[in-house]
Structure formats: structure tokens, C-alpha cells
């Protein structure tokens, strides 16, 4: 299966927090992880450019990290540093994203 991420945004649009900077919060349901990352358009479409995304530990205990070049989350097994296997349900991940509005 392919990398499948469904994004739910809190609010209707990015909130301006400083001149040229906006913030979005929400939750990603990463139901099918794949090492070949796919852009999470639910976040990337909200900004002209993404500065950073800060993810929480997932509901299944997976440790996600934002990969700027891919505009996606790479996930790791806790305490091992090993990337999650393909087709694993990584659960839900809360996040805060910052970007240029």
C-alpha cells in the first residue's frame, strides 16, 4: 500500500502569528506508512512555504519526525531508531505547523 495520511485541521485556515508567519494545528491519521514518503497536502497546501512541523508521539507510540524536503513524516520505532516497516498503521499524530502565509 502507499503512504496514506488524512489530515484534520483545527479551524478553517492558518492563523497569522507574526508578519509573514502563520500557524496551523491539527491531527494526522497515518493509516498506512511507507518508506517512500508522500507529501501531506493537508499541511503543505496551507502555506506558501513550510518552516517546520512539530509532531507529537503517535497514538500507537511511534516517533514521527518532519522531513522538510518530502513535506511528510518519517516514523521510527521507539528506543531503536529503526524506521517503521511498510504498511504499518502509525495511528494519529497531533501537530503544530509554522509557515509563510
Image (cartoon, helix red, strand yellow):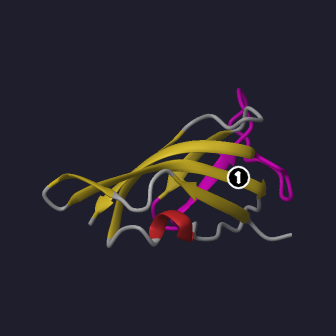
Disc 1 secondary structure class: strand
Q: Depth check: 30 or 35 in front?
A: 30
**Residue for point 83% across, 58% down:** 86
Magenta-drawn segment? 68-90
Q: Is 54 left, or right, of 36 in this rendering?
A: left
Does residue 18 sit above or below 43 in this rendering?
above
8 relative position to 88: left or right: left
Q: Position of residue 96 (x, y in %)?
A: 44, 45
Residue 27 sits inside the magenta stretch = no
Q: Position of residue 29 (x, y in %)?
A: 70, 52
When the figure is inspected, residue 42 is found, relative to residue 33, above or below; the finding is below
Most extreme residue toward the front is 12
Q: Is residue 48 above or below residue 59?
A: below
Between 46 and 64, the one lying in front of the other is 46
Kindly identify the residue that appears in the image at 76 percent across and 62 percent down.
Answer: 34
Number of numbered callouts drawn:
1
Q: Is residue 66 left or right of residue 86?
A: left
Residue, x 36% and y 68% (percent of image)? Answer: 47
According to the picture, the residue beneath numbered tag 1 turns out to be 29
Q: Is residue 22 above or below residue 62?
A: below
Tell me where residue 19 appears, x and y as whole percent: 13, 57
Is residue 70 located in the magenta-colored stretch of the structure?
Answer: yes
For the view shown, which residue lies furthest in the left direction?
19
- The N terminus - image quarter: bottom right
Q: Quadrant of residue 13?
A: bottom left
> How crowded is the residue under tag 1: few (<14 C-alpha within 10 Å), some, or many (20+)?
some
Amino acid at each position: 500500500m502507499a503512504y496514506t495520511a488524512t489530515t484534520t485541521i483545527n479551524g478553517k485556515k492558518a492563523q497569522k502569528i507574526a508578519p509573514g508567519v502563520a500557524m496551523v494545528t491539527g491531527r494526522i491519521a497515518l493509516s498506512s506508512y511507507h518508506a517512500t514518503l508522500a507529501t501531506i497536502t493537508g499541511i503543505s497546501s496551507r502555506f506558501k512555504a513550510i518552516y517546520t512541523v512539530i509532531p507529537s508521539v503517535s497514538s500507537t507510540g511511534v516517533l514521527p519526525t518532519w522531513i522538510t524536503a518530502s513535506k511528510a513524516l518519517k516514523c521510527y520505532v521507539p528506543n531503536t531508531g529503526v524506521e517503521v516497516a511498510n504498511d504499518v498503521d502509525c495511528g494519529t499524530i497531533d501537530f503544530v505547523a509554522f509557515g509563510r502565509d
